[in-house]
Image (cartoon, helix red, strand yellow):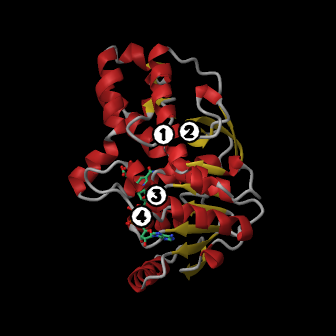
Amino acid sequence: MKTPIRVAVTGAAGQIGYSLLFRIASGAMFGPDQPVILQLIEVPVEKAMKALEGVSMELDDCAFPLLKGMVLTDSANVGFKDANWCLLVGAKPRGPGMERADLLKDNGKIFIAQGKVIDQVAAENARVAVVGNPANTNCMIVASQAKRLTPDRFTAMVRLDQNRAQTQLAKKAGVDLTKVKDIFIYGNHSPSMFPAFAHAKIDGRPATQVITDQAWLQGPFCETVGKRGAAIIAARGASSAASAANALVDHVRDLMTPGAIHSVAVKSNGLYGFDPEVWAGMPVRTTGPGHYEVITNYKMDDFAKQKIAATNKELVEERAFVADMLKG
Ligand code: NAD
Ligand code: LMR
């Protein structure tokens, strides 16, 4: 029996938490032979802690063989203690008519505080995945506060966008979605993101040879993927939750699976023309559990360069907006 992985989850009693925790405990994130201990963090508010208790009762009632323990806490110090993975979900979601960046001032503060605690108490091999919006910039904030851990340990989720793009291409081409490969998301988890369709393959052929409607690829396709979060809020009255939880399972599982190739928002270090200090979505190859390298050899045409410049500009503006929050 392997040693259990300690997985800290913030916002554990929230909407995403309710879809996420059961998947982690079932083995979907770390594999069918990897036991886990869930360290569930909520705000110090009676309603939230009571709801968390209810979720933990349901987890008990699932009798998951891999779930070796649960910690329920409103203290980040307790929740992140010795955590191997810190899944930062807890934050305000946006409502109708808002952009994710509108959440920056409120949510940014959460990530300053959590970064400081992660720095002090998380495991030596800790890895952090950020979901709370705006995810890229919150990830930059948390990394700025946790200097003990190198920036590559901090990733933000653009996997939901990759999954959305894959489905949209499959529908347009009229193929099963498993036939769509190598569709990667560049830049911000916002409408400015760029799903780089020119590199995608459908049934082994360039996507642009299968879907010859270039105007659709450049227009409605990019727009549908970029604005899917808002479309879901408009339809459900609440932001995506089950699909976000599913994407986080994909994000972490693929970061733990050597050879996996997937979209992750990472510190750009200047790759693909991004500002070196921002966290931007790009394709990575997992090189070992928790380790990855950016795939750097994709060539960008003029359209792609223009899209990347636009999403980079937004990331740089968000960075300037939170400059005060980046002081360690
Ligand atoms: P929710 O309001 O249902 O749940 C959030 C939970 O976080 C609440 O229970 C709240 O009490 C808790 N929380 C708030 N501050 C906290 C803190 N400091 N420590 C611990 N817990 C805290 O929201 P949700 O639908 O679960 O969404 C969570 C976040 O994820 C939002 O910011 C949302 O916009 C974002 N999101 C991101 C993606 C993505 O693709 N990156 C997708 C969907 C949602
Ligand atoms: C999403 O993409 O569904 C989430 O980021 C929620 C949102 O605010 O759009």
Instruction: Left or right? Give the position of 320 relative to 83.
Output: left
First in residue order: circle 2 vs circle 3: 3
Q: CA distance from mark 2 to mark 3?
A: 20 Å
User: Which residue is disc 3 drawn over?
Assistant: 105
Which type of secondary structure does the marked residue at label 1 adopt? loop
User: Dot 1: within a 10 Å radius of its alpha carbon, few (fewer than 14), some, or many (20 or more) residues?
Assistant: many
First in residue order: circle 2 vs circle 1: 1
- Is the Cβ of the residue at disc 4 closer than 8 Å to that at disc 1? no
- Is the Cβ of the residue at disc 2 closer than 8 Å to that at disc 1? yes
User: Which residue is disc 1 drawn over?
Assistant: 188
Q: Which mark is on residue 18?
A: none
- Is the Cβ of the residue at disc 4 closer than 8 Å to that at disc 2? no
User: Which residue is disc 4 drawn over?
Assistant: 19
Instruction: Left or right? Give the position of 263 relative to 105.
Output: right
Residue 166: quadrant of the picture = top left
Q: CA distance from mark 3 to mark 1?
A: 17 Å
Q: CA distance from mark 4 to mark 1?
A: 24 Å
Q: Residue at x 72, y 71 (%)?
A: 121
| Spot occupied by residue 31 in the image (x, y as percentages of width and height) | 61, 57
Q: Please tell me whether residue 253 is drawn above or below residue 210 in the rendered image.
A: below
